[in-house]
Image: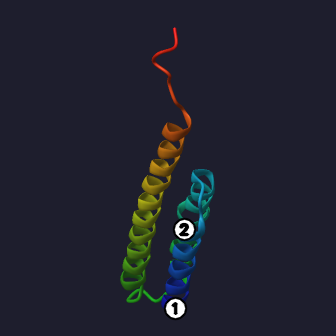
Amino acid sequence: MENQLAELQRAALAAIAERNALSELQELKVQYLGKKGALTAFLRGMGGLAPEERPRIGQLVNDVRQVLEQAIGEKETTLAAQVLSQKLSSEKIYITLP
């Protein structure tokens, strides 16, 4: 299960890095962190684990969630800044016009 979590984190981080639109990033957020997302599926699957493994796997899932939330937040900030920059550069106001 640890290997699956590591692979999920790697794939999610790669997908986050590839996205160039806020809407695409939001879809990824739902896909990985949402109610029916991949991490939630891991948490639901923990019922079949041995009781002594649950805390360790639960901590790993929470760590992956934090990493993904941070990566998505940073990418959202970057994309929002790019959108604002493009908008400001394309919109010009001529103050000399009546």
Picture layout, residue 23 above or below residue 13: above
Position in image of residue 81 (x %, y %): 44, 49
Residue at the far front in the pictured view: 96
- The residue singled out by tag 2 in the image is 16
Q: Is residue 53 visible?
A: yes
Q: Which structural element holds mark 2?
A: helix
Q: CA distance from mark 1 to mark 2?
A: 20 Å
Task: Name which residue lies at 52% across and 81% down.
Answer: 10
Label of residue 3 in the image: 1
Q: Nearer the viewer, residue 56 or 30?
A: 30
Task: Name which residue lies at 63% across and 57% down.
Answer: 24
Disc 1 or 2, which lies upstream in sequence? Answer: 1
Label of residue 89 in the image: none
Bin the neighbour count of mark 1 within 10 Å (Cα to Cα): few under 14, some 14-19, many 20 and up: few
Q: Amino acid at mark 2?
A: Ile
Q: Which structural element holds mark 1?
A: helix
Q: Nearer the viewer, residue 95 or 7?
A: 95
Residue at the far top in the pictured view: 98
Scheme by which the image is coloured: rainbow
Q: Amino acid at mark 1?
A: Asn
Picture layout, residue 67 above or below residue 54: above
Bin the neighbour count of mark 2 within 10 Å (Cα to Cα): few under 14, some 14-19, many 20 and up: many
Task: Name which residue lies at 46% across and 89% down.
Answer: 50
Q: Nearer the viewer, residue 79 or 67?
A: 79
Picture layout, residue 76 above or below residue 48: above
Position in image of residue 60 (x %, y %): 40, 80
